[in-house]
Amino acid sequence: MIIFRKIKLEDLDVIYNDQILRPLLTAEAPDPGQRFGMVIERDKCIVGGVCGYRLYGRAFINCVIIKNSREEAVLLDGLIRSLIHVLDREGVKELYAVDDKYRQLYAAIGFEPVKPEGVPHNLMVDISEFFNKKHCH
């Protein structure tokens, strides 16, 4: 079974001791107290995740890791949609990502190109509108 969930305290050692997953804990954030993280758990093993930070009602993705490239698209889709749901519950209005190798997958989820000032993130999804658009269904 695949579960998308927030990082738990007991996950920290497992993530840190895995060279591939470690960046989920070590990615920089302007305010460490505003960091967020989610993982993909398959059969009680962490196989990927996403981390980032919140700033002024917005969230910024710092790092995405999917260990199984064969299922990368499906796992990323579920992970980011789960993240959007969690951030919506926490009152975040916008989620930003960097235009990288996942650009097409982000576009399929509903991210659009933007040019925010002072940050390298150039893709954004409006969380408050996400659940009313076709990308959600």
Image: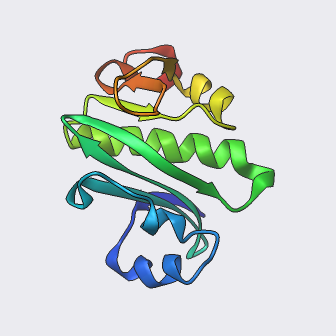
Apparent side of residue 124 relative to residue 35 in the rendered image (left or right): right
Q: Position of residue 126 (x, y in %)?
A: 35, 22
Identify which residue is drawn at 52% across, 65% down: 23
Q: Position of residue 36 (x, y in %)?
A: 33, 55
Would you identify the image quadrant in which residue 22 lies?
Answer: bottom right
Apparent side of residue 44 relative to residue 34 in the rendered image (left or right): right
Looking at this view, is 103 or 27 the one in front?
Answer: 27
Looking at this view, is 113 or 127 the one in front?
Answer: 113
Identify which residue is drawn at 18% across, 35% down: 56
Q: In the rendered image, is residue 78 in sight? A: yes
Instruction: Tell which residue pokes out farthest to the right in this image.
Output: 70
Identify which residue is drawn at 37% across, 22% down: 116
Apparent side of residue 106 relative to residue 37 in the rendered image (left or right): right
Which quadrant is the N terminus positioned in? bottom right
Identify which residue is drawn at 33% across, 18% down: 129
Does 102 appear above or below 14?
Answer: above
How many numbered marks does the figure carry? 0
Looking at this view, is 83 or 31 the one in front?
Answer: 31
Q: In the rendered image, is residue 137 in sight? A: no
Looking at this view, is 75 or 111 the one in front?
Answer: 111
